[in-house]
Image: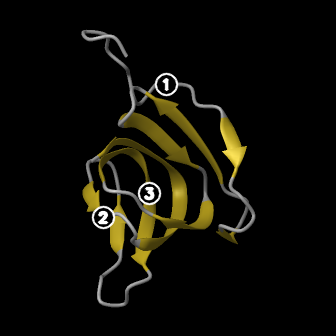
C-alpha cells in the first residue's frame, strides 16, 4: 500500500481458497487474504471450523461471528463480532469456529 491510499476493508473483494485438510475441524471452510504490506492485511474465513497455530498479531473484526478456542485449557474462549479487538501470541494453538463469514484487519507484530 502506498502511503495515503485508503483500503476499504469491508468492501474489499477477496478470492478464497479451501483450508488445508489437515487444519479442517468441521465443514468446508475457505479463507481469503489481501496483504496491505508485510505486516498488515485483511483476512476472511467462511463458516466452518479450523485449527491454527498463531503468530504475534493484533486484529479488529470488521464483520461476522465466530468463536476462537485456545488449546491451552487455562485460556477462555473468545467470542468475535464486529468491533472485537484481540491480541494473539506466537505459538498459541487455536480452533476457529465461524458461524457467519468472519473478516478481520490484522497487524502482525
Binning the other alpha carbons within 10 Å of mark 2 as few (below 14), some (14 to 19) or many (20 upward) gives some
Q: On the rendered image, what quadrant is the N terminus found in? A: top left
**Looking at the image, which residue is at 37% across and 20% down?**
7
**Looking at the image, which residue is at 39% across and 57% down?**
55
Reply above or below: 107 against 50.
above
Image side of residue 8 versus residue 97, left or right:
left
- Residue that label 2 marks: 89
- Residue that label 3 marks: 65
Proximity of marks 1 and 3: CB atoms separated by less than 8 Å:
no
Reply above or below: 95 against 38.
below
Label 3, secondary structure: give it.
strand
Binning the other alpha carbons within 10 Å of mark 1 as few (below 14), some (14 to 19) or many (20 upward) gives few
Q: Position of residue 92 (x, y in %)?
A: 39, 71
Disc 2/disc 3 C-alpha distance (Å): 21 Å
- The image quadrant that residue 4 belongs to is top left
Q: Position of residue 29 (x, y in %)?
A: 67, 56
Reply above or below: 90 against 32.
below
Disc 1/disc 3 C-alpha distance (Å): 18 Å
Label 1, secondary structure: give it.
loop
- The color scheme shown is secondary structure
Q: Position of residue 23 (x, y in %)?
A: 65, 67
Q: Please report whichever mark, 2 or 3, sits nearer to the chain's N-terminal start.
A: 3
Label ID, residue 12: 1
Disc 2/disc 1 C-alpha distance (Å): 27 Å
Q: Position of residue 84 (x, y in %)?
A: 27, 54
- The image quadrant that residue 74 belongs to is bottom left
Farthest residue toward the bottom? 73
Reply above or below: 19 against 40.
below
Amino acid at each position: 500500500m502506498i502511503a495515503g491510499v485508503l483500503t476499504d476493508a469491508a468492501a474489499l473483494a477477496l478470492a478464497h481458497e479451501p483450508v488445508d485438510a489437515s487444519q479442517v475441524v468441521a465443514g468446508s471452510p475457505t479463507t481469503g487474504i489481501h496483504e496491505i504490506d508485510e505486516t498488515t492485511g485483511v483476512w476472511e474465513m467462511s463458516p466452518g471450523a479450523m485449527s491454527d497455530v498463531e503468530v504475534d498479531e493484533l486484529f479488529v473484526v470488521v464483520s461476522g461471528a465466530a468463536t476462537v478456542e485456545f488449546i491451552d485449557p487455562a485460556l477462555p474462549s473468545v467470542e468475535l463480532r464486529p468491533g472485537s479487538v484481540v491480541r494473539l501470541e506466537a505459538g498459541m494453538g487455536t480452533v476457529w469456529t465461524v458461524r457467519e463469514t468472519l473478516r478481520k484487519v490484522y497487524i502482525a507484530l
